Image (spheres, helix red, strand yellow):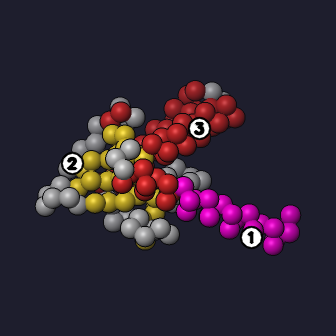
Amino acid sequence: MKPEEIDVLDWQRRQLEIEQTQEALTQADSGRLLEHSSLSETPVTGAVRIRWADSVVTHLRSLSYHVGRCEGGSATADSFLDKVYATVEFIGAHPNLGCVGRVSGTREWSKGFGFSVVTYRFERRNPGSRRFSLIL
């Protein structure tokens, strides 16, 4: 593959990530969010409320299915999900980590579970409360 072809593929991947982020933000703004506790068995400590956009959950389930199918079964898929949840919970505890996102109002973290970028929006509704919306 030529370097120019790789550049085009990388640009297309980044454009798709931006489109997915915008869709997830639209869902978050319309209230189509799932509580983190409905996905992970690990309770989130502190005053952070983690919520997932519906499209992110669908994407995550698809990734988990493919990881399990290609890498060795349900134990591998469960391990993948545990790493995702641990990364998200870490970001929830330290939301100013990461960098300014490519979509206005978001932040991004790419040092977690490997190949994906976690895009999130951190909102402070009331003094002392924090809400964290996850967009992947």
Task: Name the mark on residue 46.
Answer: 2
Task: Let me know if residue 59 is in the magenta part.
Answer: no
Q: Nearer the viewer, mark 2 or mark 3?
A: 3
**Residue 107 sits in which quadrant?**
bottom left
Q: Residue at left 75%, top 68%?
A: 8
Disc 2 marks which amino acid? Gly
Image coordinates of residue 41 in percent, x first then y, are 35, 31
Element under disc 1:
helix
Task: Let me know if residue 9 is in the magenta part.
Answer: yes
Q: Residue at left 18%, top 55%?
A: 129
Q: Which residues are magenta?
A: 1-20
Query: From the viewer's perspective, is 33 left or right of 20?
Result: left
Q: Residue at left 61%, top 33%?
A: 65
For the residue pair 46 and 130, the one nearer the viewer reads as: 130
Residue where numbered disc 1 is placed? 7
Residue where numbered disc 3 is placed? 62
